[in-house]
Image (cartoon, helix red, strand yellow):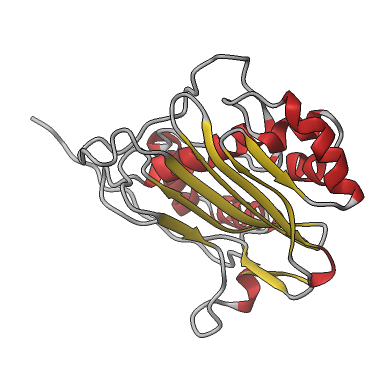
Amino acid sequence: MIIEFTVGNYGPFRDDITLNFKPTKLTDSDDNILSVGTLEALNAISVFGPNAAGKSRLLHALAILSNMMRFPLPANMPIPFYDPFRLDSSARNAATRMSIVFEDEGTLFEYTLSFNSERVIEESLYYSPNGVRSKVFSRSEDKITVTTTPSGRKLGQIRGNVGKNSTFVSVAAQFNHDICLQVNRAMSNVILLTGDMNDILNATIIRMNKDPAFREKLIEAMNVADFSISGISGSVKEKHVA
């Protein structure tokens, strides 16, 4: 489960912006909280904002990070995801920053990445087996630092195979490094569906208001998806343009 995701200097975001799934006991219903050991996250959240405020770009950024963590790029290929904030001269050529905190199989992972059009600038992976935070690796351009553990020694043998435009975590997963492979599998579960859903949404609301049985089936489907939704209502307003 994702705990939080942060992105900065990407698209419309000059400063860091965080999508936070951490529950607040004072305002969040227990029905919408997923617990794994001592870790908690919300099953569902809503992102509000005016048109062109960057809501979709925030989700696109999460998809980009997921892809970069899983798939190395061909050698010497520019990084196609680099899209810095262009309304500030100090940001136009600066690195894009992304980070994610997530849980998988009871273990907390913390991953950070910064990159430009040519290369990965910085990268790090930490995890907390048995609740103890430990470094897996850290990277500053071509310098990759690993630990002296058996896991770290295996990473040391792999680091010469990573290109400047690819993430080390994606390359290490291809070499079946256990921790990086677990990260790869966890991020493969991040599935994002975006696009213009207005026609489908309007048709669904109209049918829902006309057919109580359909409304109940819709709520049942949302419960199966674990959205923690117990009721739903909506309306469609028609506009006639002369």
Residue 106 occupies quadrant: bottom right
Q: Nearer the viewer, residue 15 or 89?
A: 89
Q: Quadrant of the N terminus?
A: bottom right
Vertical position of residue 23 compared to residue 190: above or below: below
Q: Which of 155 and 208 is in front in this view?
A: 155
Relative to 194, 126 lies left or right: right
Q: Quick one: 33 or 94, which is closer to the camera?
A: 94
Residue 196 at least partly seen: yes
Residue 202 appearing in the image: no
Pick the quarter of the image with the C terminus.
Answer: top left
* Rendering quarter of residue 157: top right
Q: Tell which residue pokes out farthest to the bottom in this image.
A: 26
Percent position (x, y) of residue 74?
63, 15
Residue nearest the viewer, comparing 2 with 45: 2
Q: Which residue lies furthest to the left in this view?
A: 242
| Relative to 60, residue 41 above or below | below
